[in-house]
Image (spheres, helix red, strand yellow):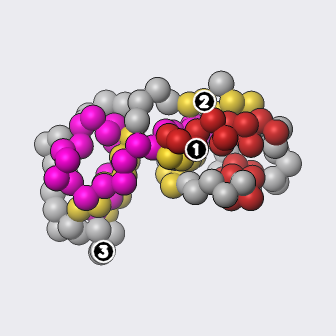
Amino acid sequence: MRNVQLTLSVLDDLFSVCRLAPDAGIPHWVPTEGFISVTRTADELSIVCQSDSVPETVWAERDFRVLKIEGPLDFSLTGILLAVAGPLAEAGISIFAVSTYDTDYVLVKKNDLKKAVSVLQLSGHTVG
């Protein structure tokens, strides 16, 4: 399904991927609006949110831009994330992916955004 043509949009803000202890509560600084992802596992609590909300003392990878695959996407579809991640990997662009019920989001470092958009457009995708 890598030949599928997708429409993506770029969210305006800078985002961070934060790592907290697995038993930590969701901090008060986590926004309640906009793009936010909270995932708890036995090993960690991961939070993705706007960078300007994250205190400097928090362990985080910062300065990501978010590419949203326009959805909603049907659960029966296959290879959607591969259609985006594959070309980016071939171009040497690292990603962090987040999936939701309706769609997928791909985070790239802000310094890689222009190259990522170009790579995706050359792969047949529309990026607005």
Q: Is residue 95 above or below residue 109?
A: below
Q: Which residues are magenta?
A: 45-69
Residue 70: % across, % down:
63, 33
Q: Three-letter amino acid code at disc 3?
A: Asp
Magenta stretch: dominant SS?
strand
Residue 122: % across, % down:
82, 39
For mark 3, what is the residue?
Answer: 43
For mark 1, what is the residue?
Answer: 112
Q: Quadrant of the C terminus?
A: top right
Residue 9: image tag: 2
Q: Are marks 1 and 3 in contact (CB under 8 Å)?
A: no
Residue 71: image tag: none
Which of these two is toward me, 2 or 123? 123
Asked if residue 85 shows in the view, the reply is no
Mark 1 vs mark 2, CA separation in Å: 15 Å
Mark 1 vs mark 3, CA separation in Å: 29 Å
- Is 44 situated left or right of 1 in this image? left
Which of these two is toward me, 107 or 92? 92
